[in-house]
Amino acid sequence: MLFEYIQKALEKAQYKTLEDGTWFAEIPEFQGIWANATTVEECRHELMEVLEEWLLLKIRDRDPIPEIEGVEMMFKEASAA
């Protein structure tokens, strides 16, 4: 589920070359998720890492995570054994 969610989010990424020749990428649906690197491949990798960290913080804080193309992140509370 996590892999599918990240893949769907990355499909929404927008890339552009900046004046200094580096690449910038963002995922518009996710405020604050962006990356900047020297190559498009490095930029995509960095963007994926930022998204993963963002998701982990959302999960930890139990903040809502937006649905993306029908893929939802849903978590259940673990019961004490």
Image (cartoon, rainbow, N blue to C red):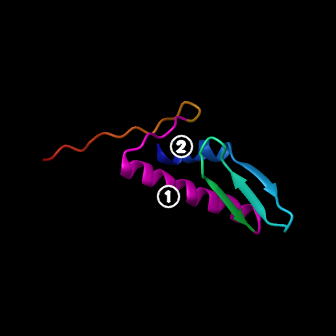
- Reading the image, the residue beneath label 2 is 5
- Asked whether 72 or 60 is in front, the reply is 60
Check disc 1 and give the amino acid type: Glu
Residue 18 appears at what percent x and percent y? Answer: 83, 61
Alpha-carbon span between mark 2 and mark 1? 13 Å
Q: Assess disc 2: are there few (<14), some (14-19) or many (≥20) residues with their C-alpha within 10 Å of its C-alpha.
A: some
User: In the picture provided, is 7 more to the left or to the right than 38?
Assistant: left
Residue under the image location 44 percent in, 39 percent down: 64
Residue 45 appears at what percent x and percent y? Answer: 64, 61
User: In the picture provided, is 51 more to the left or to the right than 37?
Assistant: left
Magenta region: which residues?
38-67
Q: What element carries label 1?
A: helix
- Name the residue at the left extreme: 81
- Asked whether 24 or 73 is in front, the reply is 24
- Reading the image, the residue beneath label 1 is 53
Q: Do the residues labelled 2 and 1 touch (CB within 8 Å)?
A: no
Check disc 2 and give the amino acid type: Tyr
Q: Mark 2 or 1 closer to N-term?
A: 2
Report the disc number at residue 27.
Answer: none
User: In the picture provided, is 68 more to the left or to the right than 13?
Assistant: left
Q: What element carries label 2?
A: helix
